[in-house]
Image (cartoon, rainbow, N blue to C red):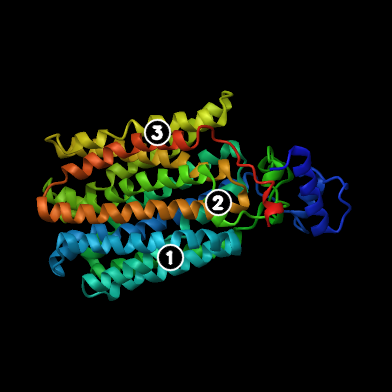
Amino acid sequence: MANGKGQMANVKEWRSAVTGAPADTPTMPKSSSAPAQLARPGSGFTLPNLRWVICALLFVASTINYIDRQAVSVLKPLLQSALHWSESDYGWIVFAFVFAYALMFTVAGVVVDWLGTRLGYALSITWWSIAAMAHALARGALSFGAARFLLGAGESGNFPAAIKAVAEWFPRKERALATGVFNAGPTVGAVIAPPLVVWLTLRWGWRAAFIFTGALGFIWLFFWVALYRLPREHPWITPGELEFIESGETEEETETVPRIPWQKILGYRQAWGYILAKFMTDPIWWFYVFWLPSYLKQARGFTLEQIGLFSWIPFLVSGVGSVAGGWLSGFFLKRGWPLSRARKTAMAICAFCMPSGIAAVFVPSPWWALALIGVSAAAHQGWMANVYTLASDMFPKRDVGSVTGLGGTGGAVGGMILSLVAGYTLQWFHTYVPLFIIAGIMHPLAIGVVHWLVPRIEPVPTSGIMNSE
């Protein structure tokens, strides 16, 4: 690899070739007033803290994502009886979703990087909303599996697009908090889904429930297309906010550096640390999302109405965990901790709260079980707020979608495995105990794997990419 001066020379030569300016022409600082004027062409209206409006859009999209995702798990006891599913049939239905998720997540990340966040996200939510509504046409396990496959393929674009948007709109010191905020969306979706889906089902039938929840995405799409732009292109951003967003950017984060081919991303230990963290821990959240309602019915004797009234409680608690986990690493950073120490400490605290879920299956009271599952769910979401941020901590903004996509594929492959393990464990042994044990131990193991592969969290060196291309 070239030394630092050689790398800077390469950057200047590449910039000269693109812009036509001499290689020694100084680059205008991003904090200057000129870019801010370009960001507001002919507009006198500005909106303070616009980045948090963007974050609110990401939060709402992730909420809708999980309402659509969880509808079938809420209705599993009803559909299993009406359509004569076995436990293994349901395991295969879940498998169809996560298989498509695994298959398309890497593709979705590349597509988001290629099309851009605005168009890539719009395409993703359009696809998954149509697929969610298509569940109403299903007649049995096979057709439900087909609808779940299409839903998984569409939903695979949600997190690559959202995390890329955070990287585009937030400086590094705020990214974990912003990620924690939008990543609370799945928990809110999981809170809303049970009462909403049960109410729609009891009033109009389960097919209407899928149609209504699927249509929510098209309402969000209108606001997304109208509001989302890159910070430097947004007519409503203030000069001060633009300067704050771009504060602390390195040369390797700027638009002058070309993208890393995704095949080369796999050559970085940092990428494998992120992928394996997702592989080991994503399935745990999916286990709670897809199997908690049936656990409450089969092991705790809940009725469909009680599932609608109470199964959202752990997910409400998990929303607090998501924001708290993102805030915690930001708090450490503000106290002067190095990035690596701040992120890993927050991740470790969350990881070692996860075994509370193991105790849930042994306590006699269903309310204590819900409380302990809530602690575990909150710890997982706090963990994920920091894990998601690792992609933008270590890789340039232009490649965040691709890195996130690879990690999502890893997480979905783990989810495929766990979905089949869960389905056949319940069908053959009729117990949730081994599944809750798995859910309790994976995060502590994962923090060890991350530390081994990524001893220090820092931006990867990418200056040599231009020469290799």
**Could you tell me which secondary element the residue under label 3 belongs to?**
helix
Label 1 environment density (alpha carbons within 10 Å; few <14, some 14–19, many ≥20)? many
Residue occupied by mark 3: 448
Q: What residue is shown with label 2?
A: 265
Q: Nearer the viewer, mark 1 or mark 3?
A: 3
Nearer-the-camera pick, 315 or 197: 315
Whether residue 223 is visible to the viewer of this picture, yes or no, is no
Distance between mark 2 and mark 1 Cα atoms: 24 Å
Q: Which residue is mark 1?
A: 154
The percent position of residue 333, horizontal first and vertical second, equals 56, 28
Q: Looking at the picture, how far across and down is residue 219, in whole percent?
A: 47, 65
Quadrant for the C terminus, please.
Answer: bottom right
Q: Disc 3 residue type?
A: Gly
Q: Is residue 122 left or right of residue 1?
A: left
Q: Earlier in the sequence, mark 1 or mark 3?
A: 1
Question: If the image is split into quadrants, where does the N terminus sit?
Answer: top right
